[in-house]
Amino acid sequence: MLIATSLAYLAAAVCFIMALRGLSSPETARTGNAYGIAGMAIAIITSLFVLPQFSVLAAVLIIVGIAIGGAAGAHIARTIKMTSLPQLVAAFHSLVGLAAVFIAAAAFYAPEEYRIGTDGDIHVGSLIEMSLGIAIGAITFTGSLVAFLKLDGRMSGKPLVFPMQHPLNAALAAGLVLLILLLCTTQSAFFFWLIILVSLGLGFLLILPIGGADMPVVVSMLNSYSGWAACGIGFTLQNPLLIITGALVGSSGAILSYIMCKGMNRSIFNVILGGFGGDAAAGAAAGPAGDRSFKSGSADDAAFIMKNASSVIVVPGYGMAVAQAQHAVREMADILKKEGVDVKYAIHPVAGRMPGHMNVLLAEANVPYDEVFELEEINRDFGQADVAYVIGANDVTNPAAKTDPSSPIYGMPILDVEKAKTVLFIKRSMGAGYAGVENELFFRPNTMMLFGDAKKVTEEIVKAMSGGH
């Protein structure tokens, strides 16, 4: 039985590894999802057969729980809008953290069931594992809730800071270490719950000062936290699959966070400490446009310019996601390609509100993968492009990142759309982007602003190209 269980867990772990590999590319994402589903199915079935004290009641409760969770998950998957995926991911991360806290509480109050000791005499090693699991899990829970509220627009995306914030966080972190030591020496339930309360507060305070421009990194970072929380609880449960899976999620999330920070020319520690935004962001956001002039145009103007171009680079952003304009963009690109225009898509590493957000939307619209390029691959092409069609992307195209040392986004690599001969910029208004920074690209002589809903404007351009006006 032990050998069969180990082999089943190994098979599930291999499936999870293959799932991560598949999800690394839009072309293999469906296969990656299939591997993930298979791995989870194997893990659940195997776990049911290795329950310490199997009973009909326990099996029924587990099956009912799976049915309720599965039904809720299926309903959410069918009804969720693509624009809401980032906040959905953040919400799911919070549930993983909360599950780790609940499991740790169950193990603490019934140690005999988990073979980690007896009531009041739990193995010290298990207490350390349990403490780390509940601390990371509680931080993940409240941190993910704040991320959800910011991404969903229920809380301001601007950095929310107050005096002595970082010293307070440092004091809470030090107090957390002390509480873990006290729990290991006294095994008091008081210190157990105090660890949870302090961790919940720390998770809230850690994410609160992080601005909108850093939110994709935060989502990835919280994903890593949820993995490490699961890994810590895996040691408590003595479940090798949970340890392996948690480590996979934790390490992959940490690596992705590092890659994204590197792509933004940022330090991961600076992101965690809420360095993006702050006072600088507030100052930048407060600066009025004054009497600076800009040029606006119509869908007919944009259609004429693009049909007479030889190359067009489309730069999608969160505004495209909100308007669900990806299908209209693809239709526009198809018309241009029939006219002999070279069309490419430029994706910034942090475009949208989560890693890969734009890639998913374009894939949904059946945009060919070989037309989609990352920042490093496409940036050199803007200088030779006739038109840069910016649809809902703001901060990732803002030249202030290269020219204004006082800007909170200074140093972040951007898409060099300003080098194109003409920049067509679709936006609802002249307002600042998610990071709260005014985009000086709006006032460049080669920029034409197209005001309105991204989908509606693009559809009007398609009609104009097709002779509908």
Image: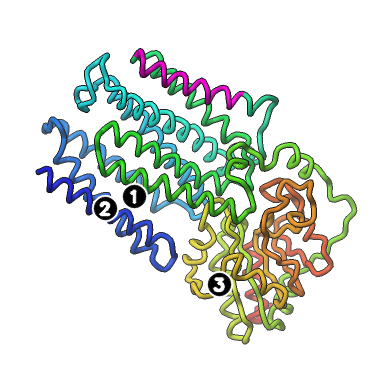
Which x, y percent locates residue 2? Answer: 12, 43
Mark 2 element type? helix
User: Residue at point 39% right, 36% down?
Assistant: 229
At label 1, the amino acid type is Ala
Q: Please determine whether, in this image, residue 450 is positioned above or below residue 196.
A: below
- Residue extending farthest to the left is 1
As drawn, the label of residue 330 is: 3
Which of pointers 2 and 3 indicates the residue nearer the eye? 2
Q: In which quadrant of the rendered image does the N terminus lie?
A: top left
Q: Position of residue 399 (x, y in %)?
A: 75, 59
Q: CA distance from mark 1 to mark 3?
A: 29 Å
Q: Could you give the CA–CA distance between mark 1 and mark 2, rounded to whole angstroms?
A: 18 Å
Residue 73 x %, y %: 35, 46
Q: State the SS at label 3.
A: helix
The amino acid at mark 2 is Gly
**Which residue is painted at 33% across and 55% down in the image?**
17
Left or right: 369 in relation to 107: right
**Sequence-first tag of 1 and 3:** 1
Query: Which is in the foreground here, disc 1 or disc 2?
Result: 2
Magenta residues span 168-186
Query: Residue at the location (84% across, 67% down)?
Result: 445
Q: In screen coordinates, is 379 left or right of 331?
A: right
Q: Nearer the viewer, residue 53 or 454?
A: 53
N-terminal label among 2 and 3: 2
Label 1, residues with CA under 10 Å away: few <14, some 14-19, many ≥20: few
Q: Which residue is mark 2?
A: 39
Secondary structure type for disc 1:
helix
* Magenta run includes residue 183: yes
Residue matched to label 1: 74
Quarter of the rendering occupied by the C terminus: bottom right
Amino acid type of the residue tagged 3 in the rendering: Arg
66 left or right of 407 in image: left
